[in-house]
Image (cartoon, grey):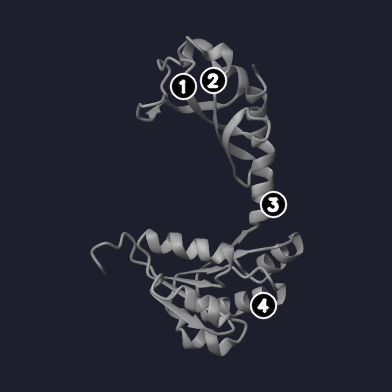
């Protein structure tokens, strides 16, 4: 393993459109050895030297998957979004190759259901996820919003008026709203994990976790 590699596991990325390309670049930056399969030779050529290897070929064909020795990989990312058929065929080929952890982009609910039914463990719907996130950010009350599948979320927000000048124990946010302030951050200062004695000021940004519906109650406070 190279000295600058933080991760030992190699990753196979199929499709170098926007989603696949960003995943491949970030995986490579993190230290993974990234091998990509791309059908478009011009697009594949543009990644020459940026990734460890780029294979030109149609991943919907089993022989292409076999040729890249896909069975040697523990992880794969399918970034194909232009063709549901190509995405599903590729997923089937990777499953047949025995890759234990496959992540795939889905462009619709039906696409996601098919991928899940054939055995893809992680299905991502970036357009839906991004749309939901923007809906929570558009009114300006939140600085960031991350929601998980079970209705749980983590948000970054300005402190409500009722918390300013008080410790977390005094403002009793958890008791009142059923959510937890997990950390605070002031400009020019390091992130600090929250404790009951943490005193909140108007300059602080709060990191708060809890059920989405309960977080919205807190966020709606002035």
Are discs 1 and 2 less than 8 Å apart at CB?
yes
Between marks 3 and 4, how big is the CA–CA gap?
21 Å
Q: Residues within 10 Å of mark 2 (few under 14, many from 20)?
A: many
Between marks 1 and 4, how big is the CA–CA gap?
48 Å
Q: Is residue 157 above or below residue 162?
A: below
- Residue at point 25%, 68% (across, down): 2
Q: Earlier in the sequence, mark 3 or mark 4?
A: 4
Q: Position of residue 5 (x, y in %)?
A: 30, 63
Q: Position of residue 166 (x, y in %)?
A: 47, 10
Q: Quadrant of the C terminus?
A: top right
Between marks 2 and 4, how big is the CA–CA gap?
47 Å
Q: Position of residue 28 (x, y in %)?
A: 40, 64
The numbered dot on residue 11 is none
- Asked whether the viewer can see residue 121, the reply is no
- Residue at point 58%, 63% (across, down): 18
Q: Quadrant of the N terminus?
A: bottom left
Mark 1: secondary structure: loop
Left or right: where does residue 193 sit relative to residue 39? left
Between marks 1 and 2, how big is the CA–CA gap?
7 Å
Task: Place residue 133 in its image quadrant.
Answer: top right
Q: Is residue 146 above or below residue 202?
A: below
Reading the image, the residue beneath label 4 is 86
Reading the image, the residue beneath label 2 is 159
- Asked whether the viewer can see residue 212, the reply is yes
Between marks 2 and 3, how big is the CA–CA gap?
28 Å
């Amino acid at each position: 393993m190279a000295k600058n590699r933080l991760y030992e596991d190699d990753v196979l990325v199929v499709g170098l459109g926007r989603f696949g390309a960003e995943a491949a670049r970030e995986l490579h930056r993190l230290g993974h050895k990234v091998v990509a399969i791309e059908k478009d030779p011009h697009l594949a050529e543009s990644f020459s030297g940026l990734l460890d290897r780029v294979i030109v070929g149609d991943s919907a064909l089993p022989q292409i998957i076999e040729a890249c020795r896909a069975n040697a990989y523990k992880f794969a990312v399918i970034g194909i979004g232009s063709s549901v058929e190509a995405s599903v065929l590729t997923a089937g080929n990777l499953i047949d190759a025995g890759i234990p952890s496959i992540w795939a982009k889905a462009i619709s609910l039906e696409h996601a259901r098919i991928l899940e039914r054939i055995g893809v463990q992680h299905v991502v719907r970036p357009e839906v996820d991004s749309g939901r996130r923007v809906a929570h950010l558009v009114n300006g009350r939140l600085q960031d919003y991350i929601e998980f599948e079970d209705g749980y979320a983590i948000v970054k927000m300005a402190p409500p008026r009722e918390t300013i000048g008080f410790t977390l124990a005094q403002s009793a946010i958890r008791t009142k709203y059923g959510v937890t302030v997990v950390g605070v951050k002031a400009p020019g200062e390091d992130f600090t994990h929250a404790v009951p004695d943490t005193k909140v000021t108007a300059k602080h940004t709060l990191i708060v976790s809890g059920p989405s519906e309960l977080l919205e109650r807190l966020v709606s406070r002035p």
